[in-house]
Image (tube, rainbow, N blue to C red):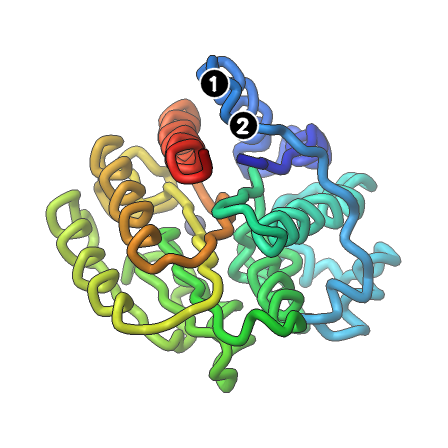
Amino acid sequence: MNIYYDAIYSDGLDPSANFPVERYLKLHEAIKYLDHQCLIRWKKPRLASPEELMLAHDETYVQRFLDHDLSKSEIKRIGLSPWKREMVERTLRLTGGSLEALNSVLSGDLFSANLGGGTHHAFRGEGSGYCIFNDLAICAEAALRRDTISRILILDLDVHQGDGTAEIFKDDQRVFTVSLHGKRNFPFKKAKSDWDVEFERDAGDDDYIATLEGVLNQLRGERFDLIFFQAGVDALATDHLGTLALSRSGMKIRNQKVIQWRRAMGCPMLIFMGGGYSRPIEHTVDAFCDLFMDLAGEFRDHTH
Ligand SMILES: [Zn+2]
């Protein structure tokens, strides 16, 4: 399975930012250590082009970002400050990673993943909540330009609602947006996805898994050409920003349910990493290791 990653995912952020800057670096190291069978092919992503960003974003916003010309309040809304100059390259490479993972599924792979991205809070003309550009929306627009792709499902299991994605595709029948999230979590003013499912504070494994199964069962009746999975693990009980209470094994079951369901759906899946802010960060890293190793195992079993 191809996973796209570059050290700039961590190094492009300032170490003093209010964000677990090292999580990409640590996760990359941890997966390499676990992957004795070499199930994963590491790929360095290219830079996304301005034209690709403009598939889902306003030209003026894209241009001002590239020119290092966003206002203080715009940067504040995004967070991740203080911004280093490398922020531009980091953002383009992170988005490039998602676009290349898309290309790998469009070229016939069952799965492909970015070890980053899933930046679902970004709107057409502004960023928010650690998200500058919405790589889910950019990839959906890019995929829909192909003759073979006419309907995409975005399944967002991050604990925060995918408000940017929902807003970008609110009147677009080609993209079906589903978000399962914490009711008490950011964003406090929710957007309207095609299907929103909210959990109360401290919802645990049983509640979460039963609800997810209901959603996946209902989605089996629909036809999609491509599935995007925003796989954030910030629903863990240890997460500093999430209000839910999933265990590591509950999170593993969540991933298994999605993997089994994808088999039944029969279409390829693109995985965007999404959020995770446990303290200590090792809990987040462990949960993402579980996710990527399970995906890589499924890829091996169904490709050879
Ligand atoms: Zn999140």
User: From what the image shows, is residue 238 above or below residue 96?
Assistant: above
How many C-alpha atoms fall within 10 Å of the one at disc 1: few (<14), some, or many (≥20)? Answer: some
Q: Distance between the residues labelled 1 and 2?
A: 7 Å
Q: Residue at x 55, y 38 (%)?
A: 19
User: Which numbered marker is on residue 70?
Assistant: none
Q: Which residue is drawn at 48% across and 62% down?
A: 226
How many C-alpha atoms fall within 10 Å of the one at disc 2: few (<14), some, or many (≥20)? Answer: many
> Could you tell me the amino acid type at mark 2?
Ile
Q: Residue at x 23, y 64 (%)?
A: 215
User: From what the image shows, is residue 72 above or below residue 33?
Assistant: below
* Residue 241 at x, y percent in the picture: 38, 44
> Could you tell me the amino acid type at mark 1?
Asp
294 sits to left or right of 252 = right
* Residue 202 at x, y percent in the picture: 18, 47
* Residue 285 at x, y percent in the picture: 43, 27
User: Which numbered marker is on residue 40?
Assistant: 2
35 sits to left or right of 286 = right
Q: Residue furthest right?
A: 67
Instruction: Tell me if I can see residue 189 in this picture.
Output: no
User: Which image quadrant: the C terminus?
Assistant: top left
User: Which numbered marker is on residue 35?
Assistant: 1
Helix or strand or loop: what does disc 1 sit on? loop
Q: Which residue is drawn at 50% across and 86% down?
A: 171
Q: Which of 30/73 is in front?
A: 30
Asked if labels 2 and 1 touch by Cβ distance under 8 angstroms, the answer is: yes
Q: Which of 197/302 is in front?
A: 302
